[in-house]
Amino acid sequence: MDKALEYWKLARDQFPMILSFSGNLISALLIFVLGMMVGRWVQKRIRRSKVGGTHLDATLKPVLASVFFYIIIAMTLYAVLIRLGVPASAVIPIFGGAALAIALALKDTLSNIAAGIMLLVLRPVKVGEFVDLPNTSGTINEISLFSTTLKTADGIYQFVPNSQVWSGRIQNYGRHSIRQFRLDIGVSYDTDLRQAQSVMMDTLSAAKDRVTDTAPNPPEVYVMAFGDSAVNYNCRVWLPADNWFARTSELRIEIFEALGKAKIEIPYPQRVVTLKKDT
């Protein structure tokens, strides 16, 4: 009986401290939930915002949204620790130690962040541009702090770490409004070479939507080499960069039809075989 009374007195003495800690714990949880909600709300608002014009475009918005989200989360964690009774003088060392541990564990991730910053500063690619990377190609959907997402020509979603994008060759097809179409084509050795050159030149000059005002040079057709089975030409003309595959496909057909009307042969590969008889 005396022991039970002793336990009851101990519980009674500790009850205010337990009640205070429970209140602080509930408050900390509420602060954490509220911080997460505010962080998500700010992140969505920045992504959807139209403020900033060309300086805050679709390429930069996801990164700024992520940065503000992590800042709010860091502030929320600080408030949670203070609410739980951790001294303010001890919070900074805790954050520093956690940052060091994360840096050591996620060194590859940090290289992705550094590459993402370089992509955002130098802007070799932007959202909406079609690019060719070392191992893939597609239209850029988003550049974040850690990765670049793109949609391939056949509609496949791809997630590429920023370090892989930055460390390799980037070929950007969407940066300029015009592109030079080039076609290698061979004709028979029986062909009048000047006539063939004239036919192809006329076809290029009459190409639909051919760029004339801003093109660096006019259409060009050159004899490039005497091959094993054909005389090889190289055709060049500047076209608008949009709808590239449809434009170039149509122009290839027009060149093929023009050569056919002029009765200029595009030969198959040929090989001469000599048979020797035993004597």
Image (spheres, rainbow, N blue to C red):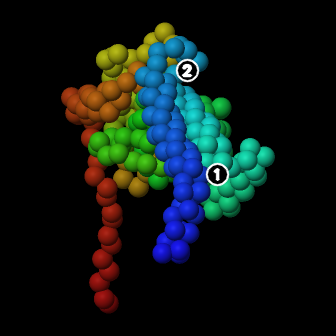
Q: Alpha-carbon neighbours of circle 2 within 10 Å: few (<14), some, or many (≥20)?
A: some
User: What percent of the width, then of the height, locates residue 117?
Assistant: 64, 38
Amino acid type, mark 1: Leu
Q: How many discs appear? A: 2
Q: Residue at x 71, y 53 (%)?
A: 94
Give the residue displayed 53% in from the left and 74% down from the top. Answer: 2
Foreground pick, 33 / 20: 20
| Viewer-nearest residue: 94 or 279 | 94
162 shown above or below 38: below
Q: Earlier in the sequence, mark 2 or mark 1?
A: 2
Determine the residue positioned at 59% across, 52% down: 17
Can you identify the residue that label 1 sits on?
110
| Separation (CA) of disc 2 from disc 1 | 24 Å
Furthest residue in direction bottom, as rendered: 279
Q: Determine whether 97 is above or below 258 in the image.
A: below
The mark found on residue 56 in the picture is 2
Where is residue 169? Give x, y as percent: 57, 46
Determine the residue positioned at 39% across, 48% down. Answer: 158
Quadrant that contains the C terminus: bottom left
Q: Is residue 106 visible?
A: yes
Question: In the current view of this chain or complex, which residue is farthest to the right?
Answer: 89
- Please provide percent x and percent y for residue 89: 78, 46
Crowding around mark 1 (Cα neighbors within 10 Å: few <14, some 14 to 19, many 20+) is some
Q: Can the viewer see residue 147?
A: no
Task: Report x, y in % for residue 11.
Answer: 53, 61
Q: Is residue 18 above or below residue 255?
A: below
Element type where label 1 sits in the image: helix
**Local secondary structure at mark 2:** helix
Q: Is residue 213 above or below residue 7?
A: above
Left-right relation of 250 to 186:
left
Residue 28 got which mark?
A: none
Q: Amino acid at mark 2?
A: Leu
